[in-house]
Amino acid sequence: MNAGSKLIYPVRFAGKRRIVRLEGEAYFDVVADEEHPFVVQIHLGEITVLGTAFNVNAYADAPVCYTTLVHGKVKFSTLNAETITLSPGEQAVVFANSSTKREVDLEEYVGWVDGMYIFNDRPLGDIMKTFERWYDIQVYYETPNLRDITYSGSLKRHGTINSFLDALELTGDLTYKISGRSILIYDKADEQA
């Protein structure tokens, strides 16, 4: 399970389905059992599995859920009764009122399992939200548009956030200040003014 996540499950599974409830992000490697499918319930629907490896990113404070299939086969049922069947290397992107399926680079979505966070053209706001969960920090932005600047790169999970922030500073546009468990990100031009 990733940082800031919660998995609720019974002491013993009873009935035909093995049901768990997830808030956050978790990687599952499920043993096949056709008579007792494994079901992950999240706030935007549920994922039914017969035997597979997949990642679910479904934080309660996020308006979107990502289900990424590594191998096997999963079926995502949305709250509005839409069904998305995934093949390996595909991802279901589900919002409250819409959903889509796309092919993805698996490492970007499951690299965290091996201690790497990989991001390609991701908005700074999304990257820092992950770091807020990992490092139990709060990130603030001098102006909201700074959240939308996109970055690509990777960070070892157990490294320090300073290594990422220092790399961010090397881009030339942004800098930061740390105060306790808070980080303020701002434009370097404002620092020189």
Image (spheres, grey):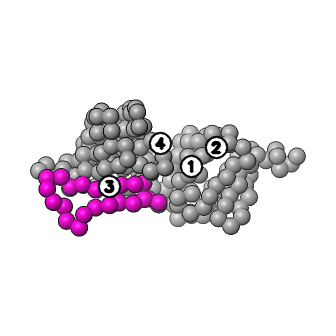
Mark 3 highlights which residue?
A: 21
- For the question of whether residue 129 can be seen, the reply is yes
| Image coordinates for residue 81, horizontal then vertical, percent | 28, 34
Find the distance from the CA under tag 2 to the CA under tag 1: 9 Å
2 or 60, nearer to the observer: 60
- Residue kind at label 4, given as amino acid type: Pro
Find the distance from the CA under tag 2 to the CA under tag 4: 16 Å
Give residue 147's mark: 2
- Residue depicted at 74% across the width and 52% down the height: 175
Mark 1 highlights which residue?
A: 127
Q: Secondary structure at mark 3?
A: strand
46 or 163, nearer to the observer: 46
Find the distance from the CA under tag 3 to the CA under tag 4: 17 Å
169 or 135, nearer to the observer: 135
Q: Secondary structure at mark 1?
A: helix
- Residue depicted at 83% across the width and 50% down the height: 191
Which callout, 2 or 1, points to the residue nearer the camera? 2
Q: Earlier in the sequence, mark 1 or mark 3?
A: 3
Which callout, 2 or 4, points to the residue nearer the camera? 4
Residue 122 as seen in the image, left or right of residue 85? right
